[in-house]
Image (cartoon, helix red, strand yellow):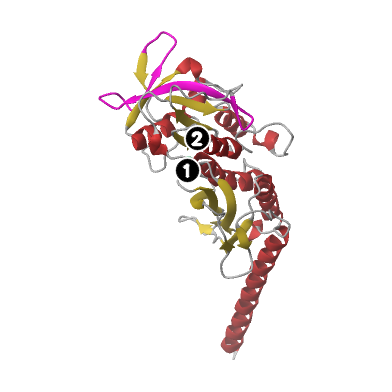
């Protein structure tokens, strides 16, 4: 009898928990939907959150550009360091920056997020504050996604279980006039290499954040190149409209690594001038070369092409030149004494053996 009662109680509790979870997820989605009601009405999005799929109608004469990025707790952010608003902002900026690199206009964002139950309240609200503020700034509606509860991770040697991890996957769709997307593969030998803005600020701020996370808890009006970087959408679209660039890439992994990617895709090499690299105030040349996450644009243009001093409100700097591959290192750097040395890709790379 007692066994039957225990089983019945257990079933009732399981049913209750299931109900709570369902209600939890439903109210969570309802909350997200409510918050997205007033978002960008002039995008390609015809139907957003609420149906089985979103519906998009690409602008006439344009093609669709798609990018996806994982953001993993303890890899791309730390809960103890990054305010929740910054985590939301940074999840979205990565894809927006990829769209900027192709010269695309953002059209719709999709967010799939797994998180532990205890973060479903204020933490998630603040995450969405950061995500949706950036989405609004760049006129990109949140058009759908998925949510899941992240399970607790149990430590193998103890009964204690730890909070589950936050994992967010963001898919971004953009559009670009047909056949005009900026590619990594279009550079030609003799082209000049340009970058927008200043480099290394994100690495310098990350260092400061790691030392004193408490100093960064509140969002202020100062520029925060690591916590709240900006995608260079306007500069990318201007490059497409003006037909100035031969190739482009965004600086997400670091100049040394991203320029190597562009060289690889274009089948060329590049030499950059150390003195010409625009270093962010407070950063070092090493931060600028290898730091990553600056989300500035790197592009190439013919040596005779007149490039404006500013693009989309940003300073533009010529930092080097493309050359044939030959036996040269993919990327080399010329220092102030006139000597040239290979510049190894030292930026971010997953699955790489630690140096
Ligand atoms: Mg990229």
User: Outermost residue toward the top?
Assistant: 337
**Is residue 210 found inside the magenta-colored segment of the image?**
no
- Above-or-below relation of 283 to 339: below
| Residue underneath mark 1 | 180
Residue at 69 percent of width and 58 percent of height: 36
How many other residues sit within 10 Å of disc 2, few (<14), some (14-19) or many (≥20)?
Answer: few
Do callouts 2 and 1 mark residues in contact (Cβ within 8 Å)? yes
Q: Secondary structure at mark 2?
A: loop
Q: In the visual, does 261 lie left or right of 72?
A: left
Magenta includes 312?
Answer: yes
Q: Name above or below for residue 24 compared with residue 182.
A: below
Q: Position of residue 56 (x, y in %)?
A: 57, 60
Ligand 1 within 8 Å, label 1 CB: no
Q: Nearest the camera: 124 or 308?
A: 308
Q: Is residue 72 visible?
A: no
164, 106: nearer the viewer: 106
State the CA–CA distance, disc 2 to disc 1.
Answer: 8 Å
Q: Quadrant of residue 204 in the image?
A: top right
Q: Secondary structure at mark 1?
A: loop
Task: Tell me: residue 46, above or below residue 228.
Answer: below
Does mark 2 have its CB less than 8 Å from ligand 1?
no
Q: Earlier in the sequence, mark 2 or mark 1?
A: 1
The vertical placement of 123 against 98, above or below, is below
Left of 213 or right of it: where is 77? left
In the picture of the structure, the residue carrying the numbered disc 2 is: 243
What span is colored magenta in the figure? 310-339
Q: Please identify the quarter of the rendering in which residue 315 is found.
A: top right
Residue 134 spot, x, y in % from top left: 66, 45
Residue drawn at the location 63% of the way across and 64% of the way down: 49
Percent of width and height locating residue 207: 57, 30
């Amino acid at each position: 009898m007692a066994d039957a009662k225990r089983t019945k109680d257990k079933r009732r509790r399981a049913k209750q928990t299931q109900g709570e979870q369902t209600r939890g997820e439903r109210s969570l989605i309802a909350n997200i939907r409510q918050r997205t009601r007033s978002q960008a009405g002039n995008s390609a999005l015809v139907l957003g959150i609420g149906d089985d799929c979103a519906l998009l109608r690409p602008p006439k004469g344009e093609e669709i550009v798609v990018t996806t990025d994982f953001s993993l707790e303890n890899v791309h952010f730390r809960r103890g360091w990054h305010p929740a608003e910054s985590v939301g902002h940074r999840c979205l900026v990565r894809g927006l920056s990829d769209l900027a690199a192709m010269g695309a206009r953002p059209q719709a964002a999709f967010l799939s997020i797994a998180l532990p139950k205890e973060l479903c309240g204020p933490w998630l609200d603040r995450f969405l504050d950061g995500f949706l503020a950036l989405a609004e700034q760049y006129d990109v509606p949140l058009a759908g996604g998925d949510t899941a509860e992240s399970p607790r991770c149990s430590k193998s040697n103890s009964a204690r279980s730890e909070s589950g991890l936050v994992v967010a996957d963001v898919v971004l769709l953009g559009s670009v006039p047909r056949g005009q997307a900026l590619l990594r593969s279009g550079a030609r030998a003799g082209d000049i290499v340009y970058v927008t803005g200043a480099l290394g600020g994100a690495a310098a701020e990350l260092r400061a954040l790691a030392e004193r996370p408490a100093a960064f808890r509140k969002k202020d009006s100062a520029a925060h190149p690591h916590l709240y970087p900006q995608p260079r959408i306007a500069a990318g679209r201007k490059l497409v409209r003006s037909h100035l660039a031969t190739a482009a890439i965004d600086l997400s992994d670091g100049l040394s690594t991203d320029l190597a990617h562009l060289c690889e895709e274009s089948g060329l090499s590049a030499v950059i001038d150390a003195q010409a690299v625009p270093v962010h105030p407070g950063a070092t040349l090493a931060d600028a070369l290898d730091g990553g996450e600056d989300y500035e644009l790197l592009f190439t243009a013919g040596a005779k092409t007149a490039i404006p001093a500013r693009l989309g409100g940003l300073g533009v700097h010529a930092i080097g030149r493309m050359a044939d591959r030959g036996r040269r290192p993919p990327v080399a750097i010329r220092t102030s004494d006139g000597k040239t040395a290979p510049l190894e890709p030292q930026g971010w790379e997953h699955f790489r053996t630690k140096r």
